[in-house]
Image (cartoon, grey):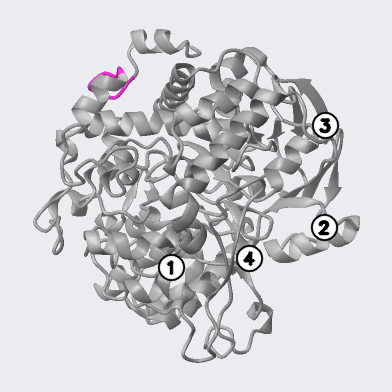
Amino acid sequence: MAWTKKILRVNLTDGVISAEPLNMEWAQQYLGQRGLATRYFVEEVDAQVGALSPDNKFIMATGPLTGTMASTGGRYSCITKSPLTGTIACSNSGGFFGAEMKNAGWDMIILEGKSPTPVYLYVENDQARLIPAEDLWGKSVWATDEEIHKKHQDPQIRIACVGRAAESGNLFAAVVNDLHRAAGRSGVGTVLASKNVKAVALRGTRGVGNIKDMKRFMDATFEHKKVLAANAVTGAGLPTYGTQVLMNVINELGALPTRNMREVRFEGAHSVSGEAMHEPRASDGKKNLTRNGGCFGCTIACGRISSVDRTHFSVKDKPQYWGNSGGLEYEAAWALGPDTGVDDLDALTYVNFLCNEDGIDPISFGATVAAAMELFEDGVITTEQTGGIELKFGSAEALVKIAELTARGEGFGKEIGLGSKRLCEKYGRPELSMTVKGQEFPAYDPRGIQGMGLTYATSNRGACHLRSYTVSSEVLGIPVKTDPLATDGKPELVIAFQDATAAVDSSGLCIFSTFAWSLDNIAPQIDAACEGDWSVEKCAEVGARIWQLERDFNMRAGLTAADDTLPKRLLKDAANVGPAEGKVCDLGAMLPKYYELRGWTTEGQLTPETRQRYGLPS
């Protein structure tokens, strides 16, 4: 459906729940989900607020195409101030929770204050209540999901909740919905737990409505689904291998960060690749991959459902992990595998299960473990700090043990939960933290893919590939092929990707659709569904406005141009093999032009003209 035009506001401190109309003037300027919720957030929350203060707010938001027949229209986002980075946090998730929220009649849920005791929010259409959750506190995501379903005796309830990691203060804890889909990055789950909220459970039966022109919308969605099906990535590659189709590709390119980004190729990449997930195991003859899976309304179905060999050391005495569950996607497989030097597919799958079970961002977790392994290798930390764990690169046993501790928030796992920036600072080696603005890198080395270096440095939520996936152009040739080792034209490319991504994230659609779709495909669907004129040009302008709004919040929160940088390792230490051998990321050649094109000062601040152009709040 398009906008329901309703917001559910929950004052946790007082236990008061109320409905209010959506600000439609803002909806025309920011569309929905990421953009519209950020507009609400910056209006209501002081940029200087402590992320874990009751004065921080937590917003769950859908887009106008969430819950519709538009392919991939199952997304929702969690918006808050990040405890990991201190920046604006917007973490996007799929599954079925977002569509259920729209079917219950809500564009947005705003949680404010802090409950005096643990609770969960239960919403059934226009009825909402806070239910005591002391009995759920201390339970995992999976156990919480099971208990809430039992309490309400309704298998169709959709639940998003936090696990033990968030409760213990892990700074990169996620909000997990549908057992293994997650708003995974930036510690949004940590904020939810800080408010004593264990879960949000939804049941919606109102159905789809508020479509401006239903026939035109049906025609548009039908035609553009054909585009997805005909595309080599969305019609074949992602359904078959998921995002794991990239593991061998990026490794061959010499841009696969390995062993805390010291190297750019991993000798064991194939063993943890999408292809390997299809190969029968020598031990039991079964494949790691059981089947693929799709989110609500998705015709791509890139999700992985996997199993672990029951005789593997990680699960041989744990039958609760013998079944099928959410399998490895590329970013998780990279962070848990090449970045730690581990090439044991079963170990990685088990650790991925743990990340889902207790709500941990596998990217930040794996990258923080990689930093800890380098600290261990350098003798900065020893088994005295790790509780006896030989935290060596390549040790599957060490990875499994530290994952179990991190999930429970115990022992050295508690320190891993600080994230690599704080961990490395604590032990006097801040240069070993591979982060931007405190958030860990994803799976693309910017020495081999220069546009991703600029993407990471300027990302409004810290290092992130999903804010500007220039890999599409630099590696896959989508929409046009650009040279991954060149810096010319990359500021323009990054800005185009950033703005388009902000618009897509605000629509309710999945960014993976843009392997086949451009705004030329997406704008007609928005225009048919939503009141107002939603041309390609307007969608791009909305994306740019969202980017500027997020940047402005971060600057008011205390960030500066000095935060738009990369670790020295990537600026000083050249790639050791592959096409990028001998190259570093030449950020300095790209950043000044980027600032100029964005309409910022040399200090990275928005100029008065830029603020006026986008109509930003004062």
- Write down the region rendered in magenta: 599-605
Is residue 6 placed above or below 419 in the rendered structure?
above
Residue 105: x and y in percent read 79, 32
Of label 3 and label 2, which has the lower sequence position?
Answer: 3
Find disc 2 in the rendering and name its residue: 148
Residue 513: x and y in percent read 50, 42
Disc 1 crowd, CA 10 A, few/some/many (<14, 14-19, 20+)? many
Of label 1 and label 2, which has the lower sequence position?
Answer: 2
Which mark is nearer the camera, 3 or 2?
2
Of label 2 and label 4, which has the lower sequence position?
Answer: 2
Task: Tell me the kind of residue under disc 1.
Answer: Gly
Of label 3 and label 4, which has the lower sequence position?
Answer: 3
Separation of marks 3 and 1 at Cα, in angstroms = 46 Å
Of label 1 and label 4, which has the lower sequence position?
Answer: 1
- Identify the residue at image location x=66%, y=55%: 162
Comparing 163 with 20, the one in front is 20
Comparing 168 with 314, the one in front is 314
Task: Tell me the kind of residue under disc 4.
Answer: Glu
Separation of marks 1 and 2 at Cα, in angstroms = 34 Å
Q: In this view, does 344 lie to the left or right of 223?
A: left
Q: Do the residues labelled 3 and 4 touch (CB within 8 Å)?
A: no
Element marked by disc 4: helix
Separation of marks 3 and 2 at Cα, in angstroms = 20 Å
Separation of marks 3 and 4 at Cα, in angstroms = 30 Å
Q: In which quarter of the image is residue 554?
A: top left
Which mark is nearer the camera, 1 or 4?
1
On whether residue 160 falls in the magenta region, the answer is: no
Task: Tell me the kind of residue under disc 3.
Answer: Ile
